[in-house]
Amino acid sequence: MIETIDFILKIAFFVLTFMWASKILIFRSDKQIVINPILMIIASVLAIIPPSSSNELLFGFEVIKVRILLYSVHCIIILFGIYSMRKRNAIF
């Protein structure tokens, strides 16, 4: 069950990252200055964490649960950024 959630979030991560990259190329905004460093930090941490098939612990949590949390946060931030770029007077 958890492996399925991890796989679905990997696909969402891939698709949303390309959507965000296309928004960056088309629109230039101040929101990118805030969002891009956060996304880069999350992506670099995801690259360093061992594969989800291992049963190792990271800060007392299972690695797969940490990966799911990071993928979820990454997707939420991208959706938030796409929404805020779509609206003129949006959240920030």
Image (cartoon, grey):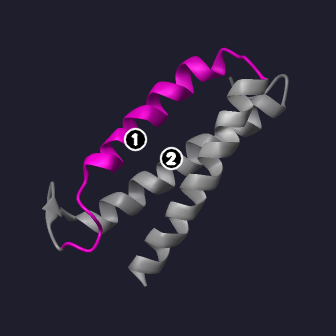
Q: Amino acid at mark 2?
A: His
Q: Amino acid at mark 1?
A: Ile
Query: Dot 2 corresponds to which residue?
Result: 74
Q: Which residues are magenta?
A: 27-54
| Left or right, 42 with reference to 48 | right
| Left or right, 53 with reference to 90 | left
Labelled pair 2, 1 in contact (Cβ < 8 Å): yes
The residue drawn where x is 26% and y is 74% is 53
Marks 2 and 1, how far apart in space?
Answer: 7 Å
Q: Is residue 43 magenta?
A: yes
The residue drawn where x is 50% and y is 62% is 10
Element class at badge 1: helix
Residue 81 seen in the current view: no
Task: Report the quarter where the C terminus lies.
Answer: top right
| Residue 77: percent from left, percent from top | 57, 41
**Which residue is more in the foreground, 43 or 65?**
43
| Left or right, 3 with reference to 34 | left
Task: Report the quarter where the N terminus lies.
Answer: bottom left
| Left or right, 2 with reference to 85 | left
| Residue 21: percent from left, percent from top | 65, 35
From the image, give the main secondary structure of the stretch colored magenta: helix
Element class at badge 2: helix
Query: Dot 1 corresponds to which residue?
Result: 42
**Which residue is more in the foreground, 82 or 49?**
49
**Which residue is more in the foreground, 56 or 90?**
56
The residue drawn where x is 20% and y is 72% is 54
The numbered disc on residue 67 is none
